[in-house]
Image (tube, rainbow, N blue to C red):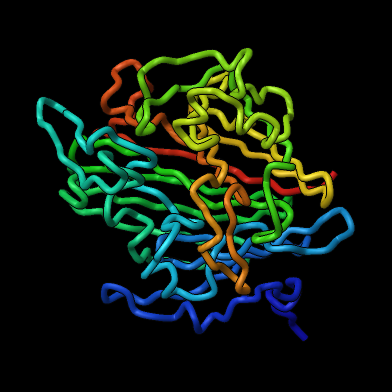
Amino acid sequence: MMTSACSKQPALHSKVKRENFQSVVDGKNTDLYTLKNKNGLEITVTNFGARVVEFFAPDKDGHFEDIVLGHDCIDKYVNFTGERFLGATIGRYGNRISEGKFTLDSVQYQLPTNDRPNSLHGGTKGFDMVVWDVKQVSPGKLELTYLSKDGEEGYPGNMDVKMTYELTENNEFIVTHHATTDKRTVINLTHHSFFNLHGAGNGTINDHELMLNADKFTPVNGVLIPTGEQLTVEGTPMDFRKPTLIGERVDNDYEQLKFGHGYDHNWILTRQSKNNLELAATVYEPKSGRFLEVFTTEPGIQFYGGNFFDGTEIGKGGKSYERRASLALETQHFPDSPNHADFPSTVLSPGEEYHHVCVYKVTVK
């Protein structure tokens, strides 16, 4: 008798109902997909915004908990009333562009301004708000594709985007981004899961220990646009070169923390090479023993400490999402790079391929 490979997979941890994600948005079908490995880790994904909905990982006693914020149904993502970017793929341009303007090849482009005077995370309808085509390659791998047409959200060029989400037997969640264009454009894709290693909705992340492999960061002005400087972290609350409690200095009387209402900044990663996959960050939660490592090919990482949540966001299982009860670690090029010639370039030309890998690896110690 033959036994299917799927029957050998561990039982589902998921607590959301697949039918609550089966809908039609902008004429395209949405659904819920599951990634799992032999160790019991499990990730659910919806193709609306290519979003991670759940991420189940064990603690040191083998108890599984969902460690990312999200919603129980597709409607809460489509008709969001609070945080828009939960678990999403961000594009065409992750982070902020000043006043929604940039000039490329002597042409000035105007993007929608959806974050005070700036354009944030791709504009009014970024990649987080579209339905991706999806193919389940294996129990542990999805392929997601999207064609962003010339002029979409003000960006030039028809852009073909392909991503893979893969959960490996080494407990790595690998996000691989590829893109090509038929016209010179700018691109900065990133992944935006909000993590809490206690479990989503289970208290603060201020007791998590964070390490960022970065000697410098890009300071911002009062509307969170980089000034263009690249400052050392030495002697500041931005220094996470050694594992440090997130909450230890978050309310320090430091101008940069006032601008972001806490941590919401880009760190310049200390890299050994330009394009190799290297360690960018670690997060450790001592009570559960969960340990998150982040690897990337990118030059920067945005650490956001959940400063703008206020408890009114109600997520999965009816849990409220409180201020500083989640963190995002978004591997990226720098914010507002199209307006800073000395930042690593985010320009993509025809014949070139954008390639960005981010790995979130969850273990215990």
Taking the view exactly as shown, the residue that stands out farthest to the front is: 253
> Quick check: 195 left or right of 285?
left
Q: Place residue 318 in its image quadrant.
A: bottom right
Q: Place residue 62 in its image quadrant.
A: bottom right
Q: Residue at x 67, y 49 (%)?
A: 172
Q: Nearer the viewer, residue 321 or 197?
A: 321
> Quick check: 244 left or right of 238?
right
Q: At which x and y percent is residue 150?
A: 17, 49
Q: At which x and y percent is residue 174?
A: 58, 48
In the displayed structure, would residue 195 be above or below residue 6?
Answer: above
Residue 209 seen: yes
Question: The C terminus appears in which quarter of the rendering?
Answer: top right
Q: Nearer the viewer, residue 358 or 194?
A: 194
Q: Residue at x 63, y 25 (%)?
A: 213
Q: Place residue 321 in its image quadrant.
A: bottom right
Q: At which x and y percent is residue 184?
A: 20, 35
Question: The N terminus appears in which quarter of the rendering?
Answer: bottom right
In the displayed structure, would residue 159 be above or below residue 303?
Answer: below
Residue 5 seen: no
Q: Residue at x 61, y 50 (%)?
A: 326
Q: Number of callouts in the render? A: 0
Q: Nearer the viewer, residue 53 or 351?
A: 53
